[in-house]
Image: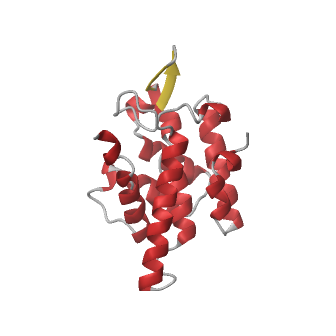
Amino acid sequence: MKINEIFPEIGLVKNGDLRASVEKVIEEAVLKGGWRNEDLNRIPFTLLIENTKVSIVTHTRAVTNTALKMGETLNKFYGENFVDLDLIVAGGLLHDIGKLLEYKEENGKFLVSDCGKYLRHPFSGAALSFKHSLPDSVTHIIAMHAKEGDLSKRTREAIIIHYADFTNFEPLKV
């Protein structure tokens, strides 16, 4: 199965260069993490919720779609270019991409990898984004989406991804 079949939202990125770069980042994260595309629906989106059945694919798609609806609503009421929807889709798809480096599977159990012991996913994800020359605005979204960004100024798009991510995390803990 191809990456754009696993994440059909890639097709929503209108800018062709950005769309291609998003695919390349995902492909490298899969390879560098030692995964296969088929593994993505088995990898949990978090290790903080014991025995979660929500995969990294489901969470990523849910965050992307939540953020996109938020962005569309804001553009409807505040002006059609209030937020950049391409950045929102790209940032949503890549916000947790570093988890493919942060996690490993050992004896059927998902654990923190050696990389993950030193770098949380916002850092490794931002490094992948930077390596593939994604716009700084996308790298910013990845780097700022989690608690690491709490003491920094976030762009509008990064704020949206941050809240979409937590909207798709917190209710699952209840």
Seen in the picture, residue 22 relative to 88 is either above or below; the reply is above
- Asked if residue 61 shows in the view, the reply is yes
- Asked if residue 82 shows in the view, the reply is no
Left or right: 64, with 36 as reference point: left
Instruction: Identify the residue at image location x=44%, y=42%.
Output: 121
Seen in the picture, residue 172 relative to 111 is either above or below; the reply is below
Q: In this orientation, which residue lies closer to the viewer: 99 or 11?
A: 11
Left or right: 25, with 159 as reference point: right
Left or right: 48, with 115 as reference point: left
Instruction: Identify the residue at image location x=66%, y=43%.
Output: 27
Instruction: Identify the residue at image location x=51%, y=83%.
Output: 80
Instruction: Identify the residue at image location x=42%, y=47%.
Output: 122
Q: Position of residue 78 (x, y in %)?
A: 42, 84
Q: Position of residue 128 (x, y in %)?
A: 56, 47
Q: Position of residue 26 (x, y in %)?
A: 62, 45
Q: Residue furthest top?
A: 107
Seen in the picture, residue 81 relative to 124 is either above or below; the reply is below
Q: In this orientation, which residue lies closer to the viewer: 158 or 54?
A: 54
